[in-house]
Amino acid sequence: MAQRLHLVFGGELVDPTKTVFKDVDNIHVVGIFPDYATAYDAWKAEAQRTVDDAHTRYFIAHLHRLRDEEAETSADAG
Protein backbone atom coordinates (compact mmCIF):
# COMPACT_ATOMS: atom_id res chain seq x y z
CA MET A 1 0.00 0.00 0.00
CA ALA A 2 1.33 3.46 -0.92
CA GLN A 3 2.15 5.94 1.83
CA ARG A 4 -0.04 9.03 1.93
CA LEU A 5 2.19 11.50 3.77
CA HIS A 6 0.74 14.82 4.97
CA LEU A 7 2.53 17.90 6.31
CA VAL A 8 0.87 20.14 8.91
CA PHE A 9 2.25 23.67 9.17
CA GLY A 10 1.12 27.19 9.95
CA GLY A 11 1.93 30.59 11.25
CA GLU A 12 1.01 34.24 11.28
CA LEU A 13 -0.50 35.60 8.07
CA VAL A 14 -0.17 39.14 6.72
CA ASP A 15 -3.94 39.25 6.22
CA PRO A 16 -6.36 36.61 7.59
CA THR A 17 -8.25 36.56 4.27
CA LYS A 18 -5.11 35.55 2.32
CA THR A 19 -2.53 32.77 2.59
CA VAL A 20 0.65 34.89 2.68
CA PHE A 21 2.82 34.34 5.75
CA LYS A 22 4.08 37.40 7.61
CA ASP A 23 7.47 35.80 8.33
CA VAL A 24 8.40 32.63 6.43
CA ASP A 25 11.31 32.02 8.82
CA ASN A 26 8.80 31.57 11.65
CA ILE A 27 6.49 29.03 10.03
CA HIS A 28 5.60 26.40 12.60
CA VAL A 29 6.07 22.90 11.19
CA VAL A 30 3.89 20.64 13.30
CA GLY A 31 5.05 17.47 11.58
CA ILE A 32 4.67 14.92 8.81
CA PHE A 33 1.95 12.34 9.32
CA PRO A 34 1.31 8.93 7.72
CA ASP A 35 -2.32 9.55 6.80
CA TYR A 36 -4.93 12.30 6.51
CA ALA A 37 -6.78 11.37 9.71
CA THR A 38 -3.67 11.75 11.86
CA ALA A 39 -2.71 14.99 10.09
CA TYR A 40 -6.25 16.31 10.59
CA ASP A 41 -6.07 15.63 14.32
CA ALA A 42 -2.75 17.52 14.55
CA TRP A 43 -4.12 20.37 12.43
CA LYS A 44 -7.25 20.62 14.57
CA ALA A 45 -5.22 20.72 17.81
CA GLU A 46 -3.06 23.59 16.51
CA ALA A 47 -6.04 25.45 15.06
CA GLN A 48 -7.88 25.21 18.37
CA ARG A 49 -4.77 26.26 20.32
CA THR A 50 -4.52 29.45 18.25
CA VAL A 51 -8.24 30.12 17.80
CA ASP A 52 -8.02 33.54 19.47
CA ASP A 53 -5.41 34.79 16.99
CA ALA A 54 -7.21 35.59 13.73
CA HIS A 55 -3.91 36.05 11.90
CA THR A 56 -2.61 32.56 12.69
CA ARG A 57 -3.67 29.74 10.42
CA TYR A 58 -2.65 26.10 9.93
CA PHE A 59 -2.72 24.01 6.76
CA ILE A 60 -2.48 20.39 5.66
CA ALA A 61 -0.30 19.75 2.60
CA HIS A 62 -0.73 16.45 0.77
CA LEU A 63 2.90 15.45 0.29
CA HIS A 64 1.94 12.21 -1.41
CA ARG A 65 0.42 14.22 -4.26
CA LEU A 66 3.67 16.11 -4.80
CA ARG A 67 5.64 12.88 -4.80
CA ASP A 68 3.21 11.26 -7.26
CA GLU A 69 3.37 14.26 -9.62
CA GLU A 70 7.16 14.13 -9.60
CA ALA A 71 7.16 10.41 -10.45
CA GLU A 72 4.84 11.04 -13.41
CA THR A 73 7.06 13.90 -14.66
CA SER A 74 10.27 11.84 -14.48
CA ALA A 75 8.56 8.94 -16.24
CA ASP A 76 7.52 11.28 -19.07
CA ALA A 77 11.10 12.52 -19.48
CA GLY A 78 12.42 9.09 -20.40
Image (tube, helix red, strand yellow):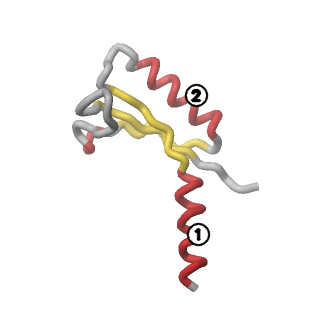
Q: Residues within 10 Å of mark 2 (few under 14, many from 20)?
A: few
**Residue at the spot x=59%, y=70% of the render?**
72
Q: CA distance from mark 2 to mark 1?
A: 29 Å
Whether tag 2 and tag 1 are in contact, CB under 8 A, the answer is no
Q: Is residue 59 left or right of 35 when viewed as pictured?
A: left
Q: In the image as oriented, which residue stretches furthest toward the front?
A: 17
**Image position of 4 with respect to 31: above or below:** below
Name the N-terminal-most of marks 2 and 1: 2
**Residue at the spot x=54%, y=72% of the render?**
73
Identify the disc placed on residue 43.
none
Q: Is residue 56 left or right of 5 when viewed as pictured?
A: left
**Residue at the spot x=62%, y=34% of the render?**
38
Q: In the image as oriented, which residue stretches furthest toward the bottom?
A: 78
Q: Mark 2 vs mark 1: give the one in front.
A: 1
Q: Is residue 43 left or right of 57 when viewed as pictured?
A: right
**Residue at the spot x=57%, y=31% of the render?**
40
Which residue is identified by label 1?
71
Task: Where is residue 59? Give x, y as percent.
Answer: 45, 36
Label 2 is placed on what type of residue? Asp
Label 1 is placed on what type of residue? Ala
**Image position of 48 with respect to 27: above or below:** above
Picture quadrant where residue 75 is located: bottom right
Q: Secondary structure at mark 2?
A: helix
Identify the disc placed on residue 41.
2
